[in-house]
Amino acid sequence: MKTCKKCLLDENYPQITFNDKDVCSLCSSNKSFKPIGENALIDIFQAAKNKNKEYDALVPLSGGKDSTYILHLAVNVYKLNVLAMTYDNGLFSQLALDNIDRAIKLTKVKHIFCKPDFAIQKKVYQNMLKYTGDICGACDIGTKANVLKVATDYSIPIILYGTSPLENDSFLPDSIQDITRFKYIMKIANNLTKKQINDFLIFPNLNMFLHSFYKLTGKFSKEVSPLFYLDNPTDKQMGEIIKRELGWQDETNREYSKHLDCIAEPLTNYIRNKIYGYERRKCQYSNMIRRDEITREHANRLFEADKIDEKPMNYSEVLKHLGITDNDVEKAISYKPLLYENHTSKMNKLYGYLMKKINNNR
Ligand SMILES: [Zn+2]
């Protein structure tokens, strides 16, 4: 097994190659982060303000580092009139809920908490985990749908996501957010009615073309990820800023935390690593090395401390919470990647193909 001399990625990472100095293709092509630029972001904000709606922007807030930082930018730095919202994915940590509470009180923005039917949500997670080993896709689908619904209902011009360039390479080869694939898996699990599934999805017939089309025509709000526009502070500095400004609190037992908002994050990393041979943390630390935020030795130390190979500390608690067994997890771990990749719509396949072409030509 080859491992990159510069970052932590190894041959398990999809489509990775190594040069004669054992440096991986991600490091050697120097996929380092180049921000789009603050002016472009200011233009987007100004256009949103010019629409004179009740709110300029919707900020989905999870209580984690990135979304809290976005709230800080939107309210304190760019003076936008913000509506904050949180979709209860059923997996929030108490720390995240407290962070949301403090941030809302300090910024004095209006906040909406979307609560789904928890019994259905739980079944969705169980089905996804039992058939694919993944629950993040279902959570993303649920979150996105609720965010779109709130933004549409309140006619808010832009949605500000906390998507971070640091997570750029953490994605799985499986299209876990594909609604057609999601519906196929729910169909084989066969324990929810069509109405229950459609209620969970809110926009059950949304394919990727329609989504783009609706955004272009203004039926859906524009989606913006400010962290891709700006020369951002380091991950650590970002944490310090929101601690000072929004009363944010971090996990005290880890030097670098990511996704402290989700109690199931360590479990999903554990399973991902078993199935794919890599998971989020390895990708994030590798990104931080490429951005000169930490050295390779430092990253290695952090990664070792995460003990990705071992069942996480809250393993039994999370399994109980999700209503799944140790046996279900073991079975899921035996699945091969790309199990349901062909169970998508022709439209989504074509969209994926076109997007790949466009990105390659950039
Ligand atoms: Zn590398």
Image: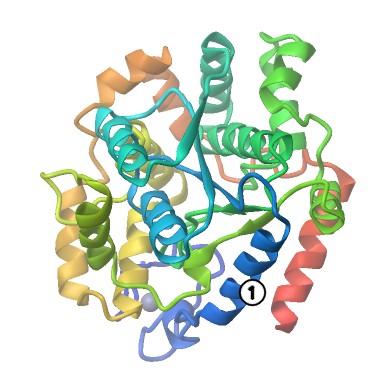
- The residue pinned by badge 1 equals 43
Is the CB of mark 1 within 8 Å of ligand 1? Answer: no
Residue at the spot x=43%, y=55% of the render?
75
Quadrant of the rendering where the C terminus is positioned: bottom right
Mark 1 falls on what kind of element?
A: helix
Which kind of residue does numbered mark 1 sit on?
Asp
Quadrant of the rendering where the N terminus is positioned: bottom left
List x then y, in percent, for residue 248: 24, 46
Q: Ligand 1 appears in which quadrant? A: bottom left
235 left or right of 153 in image? left
Can you say whether 84 is above or below 317 in the image?
below
Q: Nearer the viewer, residue 128 or 334?
A: 128
List x then y, in percent, for residue 257: 25, 51
Q: Nearer the viewer, residue 297 or 178?
A: 178
Q: How many C-alpha atoms fall within 10 Å of the one at disc 1: few (<14), some, or many (≥20)?
A: few
Residue at the spot x=18%, y=59% of the render?
302
| Residue 37 appears in view | no
List x then y, in percent, for residue 202: 73, 27
Q: Nearer the viewer, residue 130 or 147?
A: 147
107 left or right of 151 in image? left
Colour style of the rendered protein structure: rainbow
176 left or right of 265 in image? right
List x then y, in percent, for residue 328: 44, 20
| Residue 280 appears in view | yes
Q: Nearer the viewer, residue 316 or 258?
A: 258
Q: How many marks?
A: 1
Residue at the spot x=58%, y=72% of the render?
41
Can you say whether 259 is above or below 184 in the image?
below
Residue at the spot x=77%, y=47% of the render?
220
Q: Residue furthest bottom?
A: 20
